[in-house]
Amino acid sequence: MPFHGYDRSTCPFVSEMAQEGLLFENTQVSAVGTAASFTGVFTGDHASATMLNPDPSYWAKSLEGERLLPEVLQEEGYHTGGFHFNALMSSNFGWNRGWDVYEDHMWDEKGGNSPTDDSDEDLKSKVYDFLQKRDMGNFAMHLKKSITGETPVKWEKMWGEIEKFIEDAPEPWFLWVLLIDTHHPYYAPPESHEWSQPGIRPTYALNYLMRRHRDLVGERRQSVIDSYDNTMRYADEFVRQLDKKLESEGYGDAPFIFHSDHGDEMGEHANYGHRPLMYDTVTRVPLVMKNVGESGVREGPHSLMDLGNAILEIANIDERLGQGQSVLSHDRDTVTVQNLLGDEFGRTVAAVGPKWKVLYHPEGDWGHGMDFEGGSWEAYKHNEDPMEEENRWGEHPKKLEEKLRTQLETDAGEVRSKGDMDNETKERLRELGYIE
Protein backbone atom coordinates (compact mmCIF):
# COMPACT_ATOMS: atom_id res chain seq x y z
CA MET A 1 0.00 0.00 0.00
CA PRO A 2 1.43 3.43 -0.93
CA PHE A 3 0.26 4.92 2.39
CA HIS A 4 2.38 2.26 4.13
CA GLY A 5 5.46 3.31 2.17
CA TYR A 6 5.26 1.20 -1.02
CA ASP A 7 6.70 2.94 -4.09
CA ARG A 8 4.04 1.79 -6.59
CA SER A 9 0.54 3.18 -7.08
CA THR A 10 -1.16 -0.13 -6.38
CA CYS A 11 -4.36 1.36 -4.95
CA PRO A 12 -4.96 4.96 -6.08
CA PHE A 13 -8.57 5.14 -4.88
CA VAL A 14 -8.00 3.60 -1.44
CA SER A 15 -5.02 5.94 -1.12
CA GLU A 16 -7.40 8.86 -1.68
CA MET A 17 -9.63 7.44 1.05
CA ALA A 18 -6.65 7.24 3.39
CA GLN A 19 -5.65 10.82 2.58
CA GLU A 20 -9.11 12.28 3.13
CA GLY A 21 -10.47 9.89 5.76
CA LEU A 22 -9.11 8.00 8.75
CA LEU A 23 -6.03 5.77 8.40
CA PHE A 24 -5.03 3.28 11.10
CA GLU A 25 -1.28 3.12 10.57
CA ASN A 26 -0.43 -0.11 12.42
CA THR A 27 -3.37 -2.50 12.32
CA GLN A 28 -2.78 -6.15 13.14
CA VAL A 29 -4.99 -9.12 12.32
CA SER A 30 -6.13 -11.39 15.13
CA ALA A 31 -4.72 -14.35 13.17
CA VAL A 32 -3.26 -15.12 9.74
CA GLY A 33 -5.70 -16.78 7.35
CA THR A 34 -9.17 -15.73 6.27
CA ALA A 35 -11.37 -17.79 8.60
CA ALA A 36 -9.21 -17.16 11.67
CA SER A 37 -8.87 -13.45 10.88
CA PHE A 38 -12.60 -12.91 10.34
CA THR A 39 -13.32 -14.76 13.56
CA GLY A 40 -11.61 -11.81 15.23
CA VAL A 41 -13.56 -9.24 13.20
CA PHE A 42 -16.97 -10.89 13.63
CA THR A 43 -16.65 -12.11 17.26
CA GLY A 44 -14.05 -9.89 18.96
CA ASP A 45 -12.10 -13.01 20.05
CA HIS A 46 -9.18 -15.08 18.85
CA ALA A 47 -10.16 -18.13 16.82
CA SER A 48 -10.47 -21.46 18.64
CA ALA A 49 -9.70 -23.36 15.42
CA THR A 50 -6.51 -23.77 13.40
CA MET A 51 -6.01 -22.83 9.75
CA LEU A 52 -4.08 -26.11 9.39
CA ASN A 53 -7.50 -27.80 9.40
CA PRO A 54 -9.73 -26.15 6.76
CA ASP A 55 -12.64 -28.51 7.37
CA PRO A 56 -16.11 -26.85 7.26
CA SER A 57 -17.70 -28.74 10.18
CA TYR A 58 -14.67 -28.04 12.35
CA TRP A 59 -14.92 -24.29 11.75
CA ALA A 60 -18.69 -24.26 12.12
CA LYS A 61 -18.27 -25.93 15.52
CA SER A 62 -15.72 -23.29 16.56
CA LEU A 63 -18.31 -20.57 15.91
CA GLU A 64 -21.23 -22.26 17.70
CA GLY A 65 -20.83 -20.42 21.00
CA GLU A 66 -19.89 -17.10 19.43
CA ARG A 67 -22.08 -14.06 18.84
CA LEU A 68 -21.47 -12.81 15.27
CA LEU A 69 -21.48 -9.17 14.17
CA PRO A 70 -24.22 -9.61 11.50
CA GLU A 71 -26.44 -11.34 14.08
CA VAL A 72 -26.28 -8.29 16.35
CA LEU A 73 -26.93 -5.90 13.47
CA GLN A 74 -29.83 -7.96 12.15
CA GLU A 75 -31.46 -8.16 15.58
CA GLU A 76 -31.14 -4.38 15.88
CA GLY A 77 -33.14 -3.89 12.68
CA TYR A 78 -30.42 -3.78 10.02
CA HIS A 79 -31.00 -5.44 6.65
CA THR A 80 -27.74 -7.36 6.18
CA GLY A 81 -26.07 -8.52 2.98
CA GLY A 82 -22.82 -10.42 2.41
CA PHE A 83 -21.19 -11.20 -0.96
CA HIS A 84 -18.02 -13.15 -1.79
CA PHE A 85 -16.44 -16.18 -3.51
CA ASN A 86 -14.22 -17.40 -0.65
CA ALA A 87 -14.93 -21.00 0.37
CA LEU A 88 -13.54 -20.41 3.87
CA MET A 89 -16.35 -17.90 4.53
CA SER A 90 -19.12 -20.01 2.99
CA SER A 91 -22.33 -21.16 4.63
CA ASN A 92 -21.05 -24.66 5.38
CA PHE A 93 -18.27 -23.09 7.50
CA GLY A 94 -20.97 -21.47 9.65
CA TRP A 95 -20.70 -17.89 8.42
CA ASN A 96 -24.28 -17.53 7.11
CA ARG A 97 -25.75 -16.58 10.48
CA GLY A 98 -27.30 -13.12 10.75
CA TRP A 99 -27.63 -12.35 7.04
CA ASP A 100 -30.79 -11.46 5.16
CA VAL A 101 -28.88 -12.00 1.91
CA TYR A 102 -25.77 -14.19 1.85
CA GLU A 103 -24.22 -15.05 -1.51
CA ASP A 104 -21.15 -17.24 -1.16
CA HIS A 105 -21.52 -18.62 -4.72
CA MET A 106 -20.39 -22.10 -3.72
CA TRP A 107 -22.76 -24.00 -6.00
CA ASP A 108 -23.33 -21.56 -8.87
CA GLU A 109 -22.32 -23.99 -11.60
CA LYS A 110 -24.72 -26.65 -10.29
CA GLY A 111 -27.59 -24.18 -10.06
CA GLY A 112 -28.42 -24.95 -6.44
CA ASN A 113 -27.37 -24.48 -2.86
CA SER A 114 -25.82 -27.88 -2.24
CA PRO A 115 -23.60 -30.31 -4.14
CA THR A 116 -25.12 -33.01 -6.34
CA ASP A 117 -24.56 -36.70 -5.60
CA ASP A 118 -24.84 -38.07 -9.14
CA SER A 119 -22.39 -40.50 -10.73
CA ASP A 120 -20.20 -37.71 -12.15
CA GLU A 121 -19.78 -36.25 -8.67
CA ASP A 122 -18.99 -39.70 -7.26
CA LEU A 123 -16.30 -40.28 -9.90
CA LYS A 124 -14.83 -36.84 -9.26
CA SER A 125 -14.70 -37.63 -5.53
CA LYS A 126 -12.77 -40.85 -6.15
CA VAL A 127 -10.28 -39.05 -8.39
CA TYR A 128 -9.76 -36.33 -5.77
CA ASP A 129 -9.19 -38.93 -3.04
CA PHE A 130 -6.71 -40.82 -5.23
CA LEU A 131 -4.70 -37.66 -5.97
CA GLN A 132 -4.86 -36.34 -2.42
CA LYS A 133 -3.43 -39.57 -0.97
CA ARG A 134 -0.46 -39.16 -3.31
CA ASP A 135 -0.01 -35.47 -2.44
CA MET A 136 -0.93 -34.52 -6.01
CA GLY A 137 -4.24 -32.71 -5.54
CA ASN A 138 -2.70 -29.25 -5.77
CA PHE A 139 -0.53 -30.23 -8.74
CA ALA A 140 -3.53 -31.67 -10.61
CA MET A 141 -5.62 -28.55 -9.99
CA HIS A 142 -2.88 -26.25 -11.30
CA LEU A 143 -2.19 -28.54 -14.26
CA LYS A 144 -5.86 -28.53 -15.21
CA LYS A 145 -6.07 -24.73 -14.95
CA SER A 146 -2.85 -24.33 -16.94
CA ILE A 147 -4.10 -26.56 -19.75
CA THR A 148 -7.57 -25.00 -19.99
CA GLY A 149 -6.42 -21.41 -19.40
CA GLU A 150 -9.41 -20.93 -17.10
CA THR A 151 -9.26 -17.51 -15.46
CA PRO A 152 -10.08 -16.99 -11.77
CA VAL A 153 -13.42 -15.57 -10.65
CA LYS A 154 -13.38 -11.76 -10.54
CA TRP A 155 -15.42 -9.15 -8.73
CA GLU A 156 -17.50 -8.31 -11.83
CA LYS A 157 -19.30 -11.63 -11.44
CA MET A 158 -21.03 -10.43 -8.26
CA TRP A 159 -21.23 -6.72 -9.10
CA GLY A 160 -24.83 -6.92 -10.33
CA GLU A 161 -25.94 -8.56 -7.07
CA ILE A 162 -24.21 -5.87 -5.02
CA GLU A 163 -25.79 -3.08 -7.07
CA LYS A 164 -29.22 -4.66 -6.59
CA PHE A 165 -28.71 -4.93 -2.84
CA ILE A 166 -27.81 -1.23 -2.56
CA GLU A 167 -30.78 -0.23 -4.70
CA ASP A 168 -33.39 -2.43 -2.97
CA ALA A 169 -32.27 -2.86 0.67
CA PRO A 170 -34.60 -1.27 3.24
CA GLU A 171 -32.89 1.15 5.59
CA PRO A 172 -30.94 0.78 7.74
CA TRP A 173 -28.72 -1.74 5.98
CA PHE A 174 -25.24 -3.23 6.33
CA LEU A 175 -23.22 -4.44 3.32
CA TRP A 176 -20.13 -6.64 3.60
CA VAL A 177 -18.06 -7.63 0.55
CA LEU A 178 -14.98 -9.87 0.58
CA LEU A 179 -12.83 -9.84 -2.57
CA ILE A 180 -10.54 -12.70 -3.63
CA ASP A 181 -8.97 -10.84 -6.55
CA THR A 182 -5.65 -10.38 -4.70
CA HIS A 183 -5.58 -14.08 -3.82
CA HIS A 184 -3.93 -16.98 -5.64
CA PRO A 185 -3.32 -17.25 -8.53
CA TYR A 186 -2.61 -13.46 -8.73
CA TYR A 187 -4.17 -12.90 -12.13
CA ALA A 188 -6.15 -9.76 -12.95
CA PRO A 189 -7.83 -9.30 -16.37
CA PRO A 190 -5.17 -8.42 -18.99
CA GLU A 191 -6.68 -4.98 -19.62
CA SER A 192 -5.95 -4.16 -15.96
CA HIS A 193 -2.25 -5.06 -16.09
CA GLU A 194 -0.33 -1.98 -15.02
CA TRP A 195 2.90 -3.98 -14.79
CA SER A 196 4.10 -6.69 -17.15
CA GLN A 197 3.30 -10.25 -16.05
CA PRO A 198 2.96 -13.74 -17.55
CA GLY A 199 -0.24 -14.98 -19.21
CA ILE A 200 -2.75 -17.13 -17.38
CA ARG A 201 -1.15 -20.50 -18.12
CA PRO A 202 2.41 -19.65 -16.96
CA THR A 203 0.84 -17.78 -14.01
CA TYR A 204 -0.65 -21.03 -12.70
CA ALA A 205 2.69 -22.78 -13.16
CA LEU A 206 4.48 -19.96 -11.34
CA ASN A 207 1.97 -20.06 -8.49
CA TYR A 208 2.49 -23.80 -8.11
CA LEU A 209 6.24 -23.24 -7.81
CA MET A 210 5.66 -20.36 -5.42
CA ARG A 211 3.60 -22.44 -3.01
CA ARG A 212 5.22 -25.87 -3.24
CA HIS A 213 8.82 -25.24 -4.32
CA ARG A 214 9.69 -21.81 -2.94
CA ASP A 215 13.43 -22.33 -3.41
CA LEU A 216 12.92 -22.56 -7.19
CA VAL A 217 11.23 -19.16 -7.57
CA GLY A 218 14.54 -17.28 -7.71
CA GLU A 219 14.64 -14.59 -10.39
CA ARG A 220 10.94 -15.16 -11.09
CA ARG A 221 10.15 -13.33 -7.83
CA GLN A 222 9.60 -10.00 -9.60
CA SER A 223 7.01 -11.62 -11.86
CA VAL A 224 5.13 -12.77 -8.76
CA ILE A 225 5.27 -9.26 -7.31
CA ASP A 226 4.13 -7.68 -10.59
CA SER A 227 1.20 -10.10 -10.79
CA TYR A 228 0.20 -9.39 -7.20
CA ASP A 229 0.42 -5.62 -7.71
CA ASN A 230 -1.82 -5.89 -10.77
CA THR A 231 -4.47 -7.66 -8.71
CA MET A 232 -4.30 -4.84 -6.17
CA ARG A 233 -4.91 -2.22 -8.86
CA TYR A 234 -7.82 -4.28 -10.11
CA ALA A 235 -9.36 -4.71 -6.66
CA ASP A 236 -8.91 -0.98 -6.05
CA GLU A 237 -11.16 -0.34 -9.03
CA PHE A 238 -13.93 -2.29 -7.29
CA VAL A 239 -13.66 0.00 -4.26
CA ARG A 240 -13.90 3.00 -6.59
CA GLN A 241 -16.98 1.59 -8.31
CA LEU A 242 -18.65 0.76 -5.00
CA ASP A 243 -18.05 4.28 -3.70
CA LYS A 244 -19.45 5.71 -6.94
CA LYS A 245 -22.55 3.51 -6.66
CA LEU A 246 -23.15 4.58 -3.06
CA GLU A 247 -22.86 8.22 -4.10
CA SER A 248 -25.32 7.80 -6.98
CA GLU A 249 -27.89 6.15 -4.69
CA GLY A 250 -27.71 8.91 -2.09
CA TYR A 251 -25.35 7.15 0.31
CA GLY A 252 -22.27 9.29 -0.28
CA ASP A 253 -22.11 10.16 3.43
CA ALA A 254 -22.52 6.58 4.66
CA PRO A 255 -19.71 5.09 6.78
CA PHE A 256 -17.31 3.18 4.50
CA ILE A 257 -14.63 0.83 5.85
CA PHE A 258 -11.84 -0.84 3.88
CA HIS A 259 -9.52 -3.48 5.34
CA SER A 260 -7.71 -6.71 4.57
CA ASP A 261 -7.80 -10.00 6.47
CA HIS A 262 -4.10 -10.83 6.04
CA GLY A 263 -1.06 -9.95 3.98
CA ASP A 264 1.08 -12.07 1.67
CA GLU A 265 4.80 -12.77 1.78
CA MET A 266 6.85 -12.42 -1.36
CA GLY A 267 9.87 -14.44 -0.24
CA GLU A 268 10.81 -12.13 2.65
CA HIS A 269 11.04 -14.93 5.21
CA ALA A 270 11.55 -17.88 2.84
CA ASN A 271 7.83 -17.94 2.17
CA TYR A 272 5.26 -17.00 -0.46
CA GLY A 273 1.61 -16.48 0.38
CA HIS A 274 0.26 -16.44 3.94
CA ARG A 275 1.40 -19.21 6.22
CA PRO A 276 0.59 -18.72 9.94
CA LEU A 277 3.74 -16.67 10.55
CA MET A 278 3.84 -13.69 12.90
CA TYR A 279 5.76 -11.23 10.71
CA ASP A 280 4.25 -7.90 9.66
CA THR A 281 4.29 -9.04 6.04
CA VAL A 282 1.24 -11.17 6.87
CA THR A 283 -0.10 -9.71 10.14
CA ARG A 284 -0.12 -5.95 9.42
CA VAL A 285 -3.00 -4.88 7.20
CA PRO A 286 -4.59 -1.70 5.85
CA LEU A 287 -7.55 -0.24 7.71
CA VAL A 288 -9.11 2.90 6.23
CA MET A 289 -12.43 4.54 7.12
CA LYS A 290 -14.39 7.51 5.88
CA ASN A 291 -17.54 9.25 7.07
CA VAL A 292 -17.01 8.05 10.66
CA GLY A 293 -16.69 11.49 12.28
CA GLU A 294 -12.91 11.52 12.34
CA SER A 295 -10.04 11.92 9.87
CA GLY A 296 -6.27 11.84 10.01
CA VAL A 297 -3.85 9.11 11.09
CA ARG A 298 -4.05 6.87 14.17
CA GLU A 299 -0.62 5.40 14.93
CA GLY A 300 -1.65 2.29 16.85
CA PRO A 301 -1.20 -0.50 17.50
CA HIS A 302 -4.76 -1.53 16.66
CA SER A 303 -6.39 -4.91 16.17
CA LEU A 304 -9.07 -6.13 13.80
CA MET A 305 -10.61 -7.79 16.88
CA ASP A 306 -11.82 -4.27 17.72
CA LEU A 307 -13.29 -3.57 14.27
CA GLY A 308 -16.65 -5.30 14.79
CA ASN A 309 -17.25 -3.24 17.91
CA ALA A 310 -16.37 -0.05 16.01
CA ILE A 311 -19.13 -0.93 13.52
CA LEU A 312 -21.58 -1.41 16.39
CA GLU A 313 -20.48 1.93 17.82
CA ILE A 314 -21.07 3.65 14.47
CA ALA A 315 -24.54 2.08 14.40
CA ASN A 316 -25.26 3.38 17.94
CA ILE A 317 -25.68 -0.17 19.25
CA ASP A 318 -24.64 -0.69 22.88
CA GLU A 319 -23.80 -4.40 22.67
CA ARG A 320 -20.11 -5.32 22.37
CA LEU A 321 -18.50 -8.45 20.96
CA GLY A 322 -15.87 -10.56 22.68
CA GLN A 323 -13.21 -8.47 24.36
CA GLY A 324 -15.45 -5.45 24.12
CA GLN A 325 -13.43 -2.54 22.70
CA SER A 326 -13.92 -0.34 19.64
CA VAL A 327 -11.00 0.59 17.43
CA LEU A 328 -12.56 4.05 17.06
CA SER A 329 -12.87 5.03 20.70
CA HIS A 330 -10.30 2.87 22.52
CA ASP A 331 -6.55 2.68 22.04
CA ARG A 332 -4.64 -0.35 23.26
CA ASP A 333 -1.05 -0.34 24.54
CA THR A 334 -0.61 -3.85 23.16
CA VAL A 335 -2.45 -6.08 20.69
CA THR A 336 -1.93 -9.79 20.15
CA VAL A 337 -1.92 -12.07 17.11
CA GLN A 338 -2.36 -15.82 17.50
CA ASN A 339 -2.57 -18.85 15.22
CA LEU A 340 -3.31 -22.26 16.69
CA LEU A 341 -1.30 -25.11 15.17
CA GLY A 342 -2.87 -28.15 16.87
CA ASP A 343 -1.59 -30.42 19.63
CA GLU A 344 1.73 -31.18 17.94
CA PHE A 345 2.99 -27.62 17.54
CA GLY A 346 0.94 -25.43 19.87
CA ARG A 347 0.64 -21.91 18.46
CA THR A 348 2.38 -18.92 16.95
CA VAL A 349 1.93 -15.66 18.88
CA ALA A 350 2.93 -12.01 18.53
CA ALA A 351 2.50 -9.06 20.88
CA VAL A 352 2.66 -5.63 19.28
CA GLY A 353 3.28 -2.32 21.02
CA PRO A 354 3.71 1.26 19.76
CA LYS A 355 7.39 0.73 18.83
CA TRP A 356 8.22 -2.93 19.26
CA LYS A 357 6.87 -6.28 18.16
CA VAL A 358 7.82 -9.55 19.88
CA LEU A 359 6.86 -12.95 18.51
CA TYR A 360 7.23 -16.67 18.96
CA HIS A 361 7.33 -19.48 16.38
CA PRO A 362 7.37 -23.05 17.79
CA GLU A 363 9.89 -25.66 16.74
CA GLY A 364 9.10 -27.77 13.69
CA ASP A 365 7.94 -27.56 10.10
CA TRP A 366 4.20 -26.81 10.51
CA GLY A 367 3.47 -25.87 6.91
CA HIS A 368 6.00 -23.07 6.59
CA GLY A 369 8.64 -25.02 4.68
CA MET A 370 11.40 -24.40 7.21
CA ASP A 371 12.21 -25.50 10.76
CA PHE A 372 12.35 -23.08 13.68
CA GLU A 373 14.96 -25.06 15.59
CA GLY A 374 14.20 -25.08 19.28
CA GLY A 375 11.48 -22.47 18.81
CA SER A 376 12.15 -18.90 17.78
CA TRP A 377 11.83 -15.86 20.09
CA GLU A 378 12.11 -12.67 18.06
CA ALA A 379 11.84 -8.90 18.59
CA TYR A 380 11.75 -6.10 16.01
CA LYS A 381 11.55 -2.32 16.23
CA HIS A 382 8.98 -1.00 13.75
CA ASN A 383 10.45 2.33 12.71
CA GLU A 384 14.04 1.06 12.36
CA ASP A 385 13.38 -2.33 10.79
CA PRO A 386 9.96 -2.45 9.06
CA MET A 387 10.82 -5.64 7.13
CA GLU A 388 11.82 -7.40 10.38
CA GLU A 389 15.24 -8.56 9.31
CA GLU A 390 17.24 -7.93 12.51
CA ASN A 391 16.18 -9.96 15.52
CA ARG A 392 16.81 -7.83 18.61
CA TRP A 393 15.47 -10.20 21.23
CA GLY A 394 16.70 -9.00 24.61
CA GLU A 395 16.45 -5.29 23.79
CA HIS A 396 12.66 -5.21 23.76
CA PRO A 397 10.40 -3.93 26.60
CA LYS A 398 9.88 -6.62 29.23
CA LYS A 399 6.19 -5.77 29.61
CA LEU A 400 5.68 -6.65 25.95
CA GLU A 401 7.38 -10.01 26.50
CA GLU A 402 5.11 -10.62 29.48
CA LYS A 403 2.10 -10.05 27.22
CA LEU A 404 3.52 -12.53 24.72
CA ARG A 405 4.12 -15.22 27.34
CA THR A 406 0.70 -14.66 28.90
CA GLN A 407 -0.96 -15.18 25.52
CA LEU A 408 1.05 -18.37 24.99
CA GLU A 409 -0.21 -19.72 28.31
CA THR A 410 -3.85 -18.67 27.84
CA ASP A 411 -6.34 -21.48 27.31
CA ALA A 412 -7.13 -21.37 23.60
CA GLY A 413 -10.30 -23.46 23.95
CA GLU A 414 -9.49 -25.26 20.71
CA VAL A 415 -12.35 -27.27 19.26
CA ARG A 416 -12.07 -30.94 18.32
CA SER A 417 -14.05 -31.84 15.22
CA LYS A 418 -13.40 -33.19 11.77
CA GLY A 419 -15.76 -34.23 9.00
CA ASP A 420 -15.89 -34.82 5.27
CA MET A 421 -15.28 -31.97 2.84
CA ASP A 422 -17.11 -31.83 -0.49
CA ASN A 423 -15.09 -31.59 -3.70
CA GLU A 424 -16.24 -28.10 -4.66
CA THR A 425 -14.93 -26.78 -1.33
CA LYS A 426 -11.66 -28.70 -1.78
CA GLU A 427 -11.08 -27.23 -5.22
CA ARG A 428 -11.88 -23.69 -4.08
CA LEU A 429 -9.51 -24.06 -1.11
CA ARG A 430 -6.73 -25.37 -3.37
CA GLU A 431 -7.13 -22.31 -5.58
CA LEU A 432 -6.81 -20.09 -2.51
CA GLY A 433 -3.77 -21.97 -1.25
CA TYR A 434 -5.25 -23.51 1.92
CA ILE A 435 -4.99 -27.10 0.69
CA GLU A 436 -1.67 -28.18 -0.74
Image: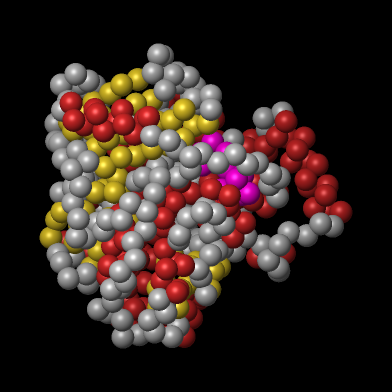
Q: Is residue 8 above or below residue 69?
A: above
Q: Is residue 400 above or below residue 332?
A: above
Q: Is residue 111 above or below residue 345?
A: below
Q: Is residue 7 visible?
A: no
- Asked whether 101 or 431 is in front, the reply is 101
**Which colour assignment does the render follow?**
secondary structure
Predominant secondary structure, magenta span: loop
**The C terminus is located in which quarter?**
top right
Q: Residue furthest top?
A: 374
Q: Is residue 213 above or below residue 420?
A: above
Left or right: residue 179 compared with residue 284: right
Residue 402: image x %, image y %? Answer: 24, 29
Residue 26: image x %, image y %? Answer: 22, 46
54 is within the stretch colored magenta: yes
Q: How many marks?
A: 0
- Asked whether 112 or 346 is in front, the reply is 346
Q: Residue at x 50, y 68 (%)?
A: 98
220 is within the stretch colored magenta: no
- Magenta stretch in the rendered image: 49-59
Q: Residue at x 45, y 74 (%)?
A: 75
Q: Is residue 177 visible?
A: yes
Residue 315: image x %, image y %? Answer: 30, 73
Residue 86: image x %, image y %? Answer: 53, 55
Left or right: residue 297 compared with residue 390: left
Q: Residue furthest right?
A: 119
- Asked whether 136 or 203 is in front, the reply is 136
Q: Residue at x 46, y 67 (%)?
A: 71
Q: Quadrant of residue 16?
A: bottom left
Q: Residue at x 65, y 41 (%)?
A: 418
- Asked whether 190 or 368 is in front, the reply is 368
Q: Quadrant of residue 383?
A: top left
